[in-house]
Amino acid sequence: MKKILFATTALVATAGVASAEVALSGYAEMGIQGGDAVEIQFHHDFDVKFTLSGETDGGLSFGATIDLDEVSNGISNRANPSSVFVSGAFGTLTMGDTDGALDWAMTEAFSGTSIADDHSSHAGANGNGGLDGTYDGQIARYDYSFGDFSVAVSAELDGTGAGTDEAGGNASPYGDPALGLGFKYGTDLGGVALGLGLGYQHIDSDNKVAGLSVSGAMDNGIKVILNYSDRTLAGADSTHTALAIGYTMDALLVEVNWGRFDFDGAPDVDGYGLVVNYDLGGGAVLMAGYGSGDAPSGNGNGDDTWSAGVGLSF
């Protein structure tokens, strides 16, 4: 989930060439966080992102993004927080740090934001990443929309040629491309904005993921998201189920979510999260989050975590 803040733009033009735009956006936050594995502590963060876009005289759109907050040890063509795209009547081709077809298609079973991502990083949470990041994280995805339907295909290659994952292990199951296919459908059914997502990724018979999501946003401010996936990783089978129920009224957003991983031959793991956001306007949002699960949260603060503060978009 990206948090975006400060925006300024610059226009660049040359004679006979369509203009291009460079936009600088940023995000800052400050507050307090804690959990059962850490002491209560202050927290602040700042993120800067460049977005470049342009269009040819023939109507072909193109662009690139880079997130400077995540850049370390220089910038290479692998595992860096940037992406490039070209788009036209044929669809859109994106390459770099972008979602594979499964993640692109499915809706995550949480929304809103919290400083430590407590509500979206508990032990039962699943960001639908699937097999993304198996190798160097450089993904190529093509997507195309027609009416209420969209379709995408994606691939991530073992660029090292060594047949290993990015940690250097699991040589046997890896080496083949991580291929993905995704479908999305969105429509309005009598005051309910319905969204369906279906995705599949495959390396080989020991490494594959299939997922389905359903979301419904009602005119009265209630939103429900259901998310299910079935996966085999390194030959081990598991399923994941998640449900989120949220309510938005004017500037207020409140949501609770729950998720569970059912492992074949191992104990199940579940967790739940709660988030409250209040939009002050002008890019400022008050936020509070809580997460609890059977195992440590992905934010590193323990099994039970919380945070509160303000996010500032510029």
Image (cartoon, helix red, strand yellow):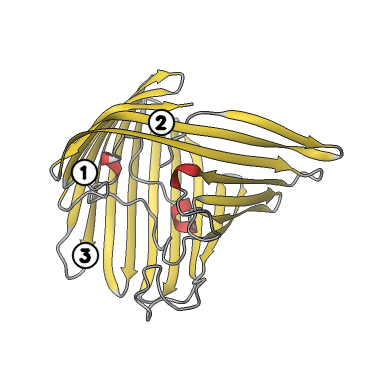
Q: Nearer the viewer, residue 288 or 10?
A: 10
Secondary structure state at the residue bearing disc 2: strand
Q: CA distance from mark 1 to mark 3?
A: 18 Å
Tell me if mark 3 has few (under 14), some (14-19) or many (20+) residues whose alpha carbon lies within 10 angstroms of its own.
some
- Residue 81, image x, y percentages: 49, 50
- Amino acid type at image mark 3: Phe
Q: Earlier in the sequence, mark 2 or mark 3?
A: 2
Residue 191 sits in quarter: top left
Tell me if mark 1 has few (under 14), some (14-19) or many (20+) residues whose alpha carbon lies within 10 angstroms of its own.
many
Residue at mark 2: 28
Residue at mark 1: 272
Mark nearer the viewer, 2 or 3: 2
Residue at mark 3: 263
Tell me if mark 2 has few (under 14), some (14-19) or many (20+) residues whose alpha carbon lies within 10 angstroms of its own.
some
Whether residue 67 is situated above or below residue 228 in the rendered picture: above
Q: Quadrant of the N terminus?
A: top left
Q: Earlier in the sequence, mark 1 or mark 3?
A: 3
